[in-house]
Image (cartoon, helix red, strand yellow):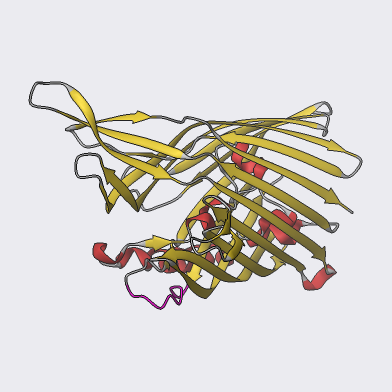
Amino acid sequence: MKILKSFCIIFFILANVPYCQPASENKFTADFLQEFTPVEGIGMGGSFAAYNIGSVSLNNNPAGLAFLKNSDLSIRFQSSPRIKAIIMKETEDSKWSDYGVYNIDPYEMEFISFALPLGRIGNLGIGTAHNHSGRFIRVDTDGKAINAFPKDDLLVGLGYSIKIYRDFAVGFDIKHLRSKLPVENKNEIGRTYLLNVGLINHIGTRAKIGLAIKNIGKPLSYSSPDIPDKPRREFIIGTNYILKSTNNGKLSANMDVNPPFDDGIRYNAGLEFLLKNKLAFRIGYIRSTAVYHDPLFDLNSESAIDEERLWIRKGVTIGLGLKIDGFELNIARSPHRQPKINDDEKLRMENNEPIMSFSLIKRF
């Protein structure tokens, strides 16, 4: 218990370092790093800190690697729709008219990860992820072959975890990130190394707690100082509790919180009902906030400027899972983010399609 308390204190201190930055410097990049939540957890509101086990622990809470008994391979896919958010303002004749438009490109992400048990010396994991957004470009304006997406990210990581006392495990993963952005008819490429650290502790046979600090590292190495280059660091604490367990099924609850709470509590909560260890039903709720600097197209001046605005992602999530002969198939549906409006504004969303996530896991 003394070991656990010591780790919790160290985690809390480390996690609050990035929030001491001046507000003017809080322009972040590589937002796809917040989308690594396992599909099982997405169905439960995005909770994962005390839930994930095996290869899906990479880029989440790497301590989950330690509880893997057999090797596993995870393949995941996530797709977000185009977000078109229209900001309306009241005119002099007391009518509401369109003022500005946010057009956020859709994105698609692919993940592959593999975990290997090494016995008493701990467990190892390796994984890669690719994120791309915008329309695929075959040729540029000069007719030169491009065959690439305008914006993409590539990540490769290696993780390790070990039980240091009975059901208490610590873990870490190190990843190399390469990010490409289109800037003034050319591509800017930035690179960096990032670290995730985490712990999970079982309390009896029903409860687990988990803590994770994600994306510790230096800014990306873009050549231009005007490009946002800081990955968002996160501190997450969560719990998993088995409410009821019988031969026919198991009902468990999960909840994560993600301080600080400057714009309200950021949390992920959900339930999972596992029927005969074969079929899983999941439901949850997510509330997450973050400041973005997205281009707002002014309909009056017909020009676009990067505007700082708080965006909120909240709503119900649902998910399903099926286990057959060593394979596990998962699907989840979750809401996308929306801009927070000011007192003199109204919001109209043109597209309310959800974010869809899928995964296939093979346990050997």
In magenta stretch: residue 321: no
- Tell me which residue sits at (89%, 45%) in the image: 326
| Residue bounds of the magenta highlight | 217-225
Q: Is residue 285 left or right of residue 185?
A: right
Could you say where residue 234 lies in the image, as x and y percent from the top left?
46, 58
* Secondary structure character of the magenta stretch overall: loop
Looking at the image, is 193 positioned above or below residue 15?
below
Furthest residue toward front: 143
Residue 314, compared with residue 20, is above or below; it is above
Q: Residue 191, relative to residue 301: is it above or below?
A: below
Q: Position of residue 38 (x, y in %)?
A: 65, 48
Q: Residue at x 73, y 57 (%)?
A: 112
At 44% from the left and 35% from the top, the residue drawn is 314
Q: Give whichever of 187, 55 is nearer the camera.
A: 187
> Which quadrant of the view contains residue 231?
bottom left
From the viewer's side, name the closer residue of 181 and 54. 181
Quarter of the image that includes the C terminus: bottom right
**How far across and down, in percent of the image, does residue 277 sit?**
82, 34
Visible residue check, residue 330: yes
Q: Nearer the viewer, residue 293 or 260?
A: 293
Question: Any magenta on residue 220?
Answer: yes
315 is higher (above) or lower (below) than 263:
above
Question: Is any atom of residue 60 visible in this view?
Answer: no
**Residue 190 appears at what percent x and percent y?**
49, 73
